Image: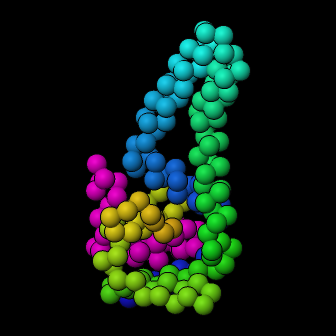
């Protein structure tokens, strides 16, 4: 059985992937600690009369809190992806995954992937022993194909949400 998925990944899907990844890692608490530390530092600078520096640090804490920094990082990385805006095709089978994009036609063994994660909008495939991942937008699959792909992924890869705990 082969499942073929063709798509052009969007910036919004990369935002969703970043949010799903952070949620799986439970990294939201790290952001909170950074924000609290920055606020304390900002208050300390303001207390000693360094209002400008304290204000700048407070603004940075606010930007982190609002998620602007994370979105800026994702957008910056997206703009540097060589295949952004080009149709990509993934063909999933029991033996391997075939990746096609432009002139690239690559056969990737399942062993190159460690786990998968499902979010509301996408499926994410994590490369072995790293935090790098490939995305598969669910919008490109009908219910039957999505069910078949879920089954294949659960047989071949660990669930990142359970594996990462």
- Spot the residue most to the right: 52
- Residue 44 seen anywhere in this rendered image of the structure: yes
Can you give x and y, in whole percent of width and height, for residue 7 in the image?
61, 76
Using the image, determine if residue 24 lies above or below residue 43.
below
Q: What colouring method underlies this structural image?
A: rainbow
Q: Residue at x 60, y 30 (%)?
A: 61
Q: Position of residue 128 (x, y in %)?
A: 34, 69
Q: Please check the rendered image and state whether residue 153 is part of the magenta-colored stretch, yes or no.
A: yes
Q: Position of residue 34 (x, y in %)?
A: 49, 31
Q: Is residue 165 left or right of residue 33?
A: left
Q: Residue at x 33, y 79 (%)?
A: 110
Answer with left or right where residue 146 lies relative to residue 128. right
Chief secondary structure of the magenta portion: helix
Q: How many numbered marks, from 0 up?
A: 0
Span of residues in magenta: 136-165
Q: Is residue 32 above or below residue 116?
A: above
Indicate left or right for 80 with 120 as reference: right
Task: Determine if residue 12 is in view.
Answer: no
Q: Residue at x 54, y 26 (%)?
A: 38
Q: Quadrant of residue 1?
A: bottom left
Residue 36 within the magenta-colored segment of the rendering: no
Residue depicted at 29% across the width and 65% down the height? 158
Q: Give percent across and percent down for residue 96.
A: 36, 85
Residue 150 against residue 32 in the figure, above or below: below
């Amino acid at each position: 059985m082969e499942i073929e998925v063709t798509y052009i990944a969007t910036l919004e899907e990369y935002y969703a992937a970043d949010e799903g990844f952070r949620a799986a890692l439970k990294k939201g608490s790290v952001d909170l600690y950074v924000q609290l530390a920055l606020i304390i530092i900002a208050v300390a600078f303001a207390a000693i009369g360094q209002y400008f520096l304290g204000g700048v640090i407070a603004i940075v804490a606010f930007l982190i809190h609002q998620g602007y920094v994370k979105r800026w990082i994702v957008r910056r990385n997206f703009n540097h992806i060589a295949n952004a805006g080009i149709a990509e095709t993934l063909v999933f089978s029991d033996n391997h995954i075939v990746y096609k994009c432009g002139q690239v036609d690559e056969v990737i063994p399942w062993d190159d992937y460690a786990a998968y994660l499902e979010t509301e909008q996408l499926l994410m495939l994590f490369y072995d022993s790293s935090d790098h991942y490939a995305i598969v937008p669910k919008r490109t699959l009908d219910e039957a194909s999505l069910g078949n792909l879920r089954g294949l992924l659960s047989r071949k890869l660990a669930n990142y949400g359970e594996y990462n705990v």
